[in-house]
Amino acid sequence: MKKINIAIADDEELFRKGMQFLLERESNLNVCYEAKNGKKLISYISTTKIIPDIILMDLKMPEMNGIEATKFIHKSHPNIKIIALTSYDGKSFITNMIDVGASSYLLKNTSSKMVIHTINEVFKKGFYYDEKVLKIIHENIKSSSGKRIKSDLDKNLLSKREIEILELIFEQYTTAEIAKKLFLSPRTVEGHRNNLLIKTKSKNVAGLIIYSIQKKIIEITPDFHL
């Protein structure tokens, strides 16, 4: 079993040590580094041979905060997935972190079980947004009056099969699960997923999800549940 390497960025040492103890009780998780601010985290990533798969990122830290650090790391190391883990639950905080590339957003009062579940989901699927976060993304896009949308969706841009796969990605099915559901090979599903990224000019699955909401390919209804 491949270990998931995790870095923790938080200015509270007690919290970092507590998270490390909690995570390393799981056989597939390894905390490879902990930093008290974004600056130290970026310095580590720039020099280490053990690149973290996932970073648990606090928002408010001295010298360099979580939003600035996430923005920098998302551009320099796009394969590293960042999970915001913070005590701030305001819409502006959530929106800013998603905008700069966070793959998930958790509050510090969440259960340890949910933290571990989110880490595994992000590692496996590239993102994990709960119902609250998805609704905030949707509301933010609606309130922006489409300003983020550069052009209207070309109806012929995505094939029927690609839209079908996009909907299943949105529902957080894995490649293997999509393949089984649609009677396709995993390789074929990966090909469609890559085409979706190219066609929508999305860098990752999280970007693809946001794109699908922006273009109204996916609608989040009041009774939406993950």
Image (spheres, rainbow, N blue to C red):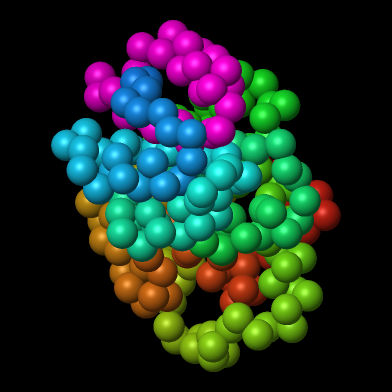
Residue placed at 46% from the left, 18% from the top? 20
Q: What is the quadrant of the C terminus in the image? A: top right
212 in relation to 121, above or below: below
Residue 129: x and y in percent read: 60, 46
| 10 within the magenta span | yes
Residue 63: x and y in percent read: 51, 49
Q: Is residue 110 left or right of residue 61?
A: right
Foreground: 206 or 31? Answer: 31
211 in relation to 222, above or below: below
Residue placed at 50% from the left, 16% from the top? 17
Q: What is the quadrant of the N terminus in the image? A: top left
Give the tally of numbered discs: 0
195 in relation to 165, above or below: below
The residue most toward the right is 222
Foreground: 195 or 214? Answer: 214
Q: Is residue 189 left or right of residue 162?
A: left
Q: Is residue 33 left or right of residue 143?
A: left
Q: Quadrant of residue 195?
A: bottom left
Q: The magenta stretch spans which residues? A: 1-28
| 66 within the magenta span | no
Foreground: 192 or 210? Answer: 210
Q: Could you tell me if residue 32 is visible in this image?
A: yes
Residue placed at 36% from the left, 62% from the top? 75
The residue most toward the top is 25
Q: Could you tell me if residue 178 is visible in this image?
A: no
Residue 68: x and y in percent read: 50, 57
The residue most toward the front is 63
Residue 125: x and y in percent read: 42, 43
Residue placed at 29% from the left, 40% from the top? 44
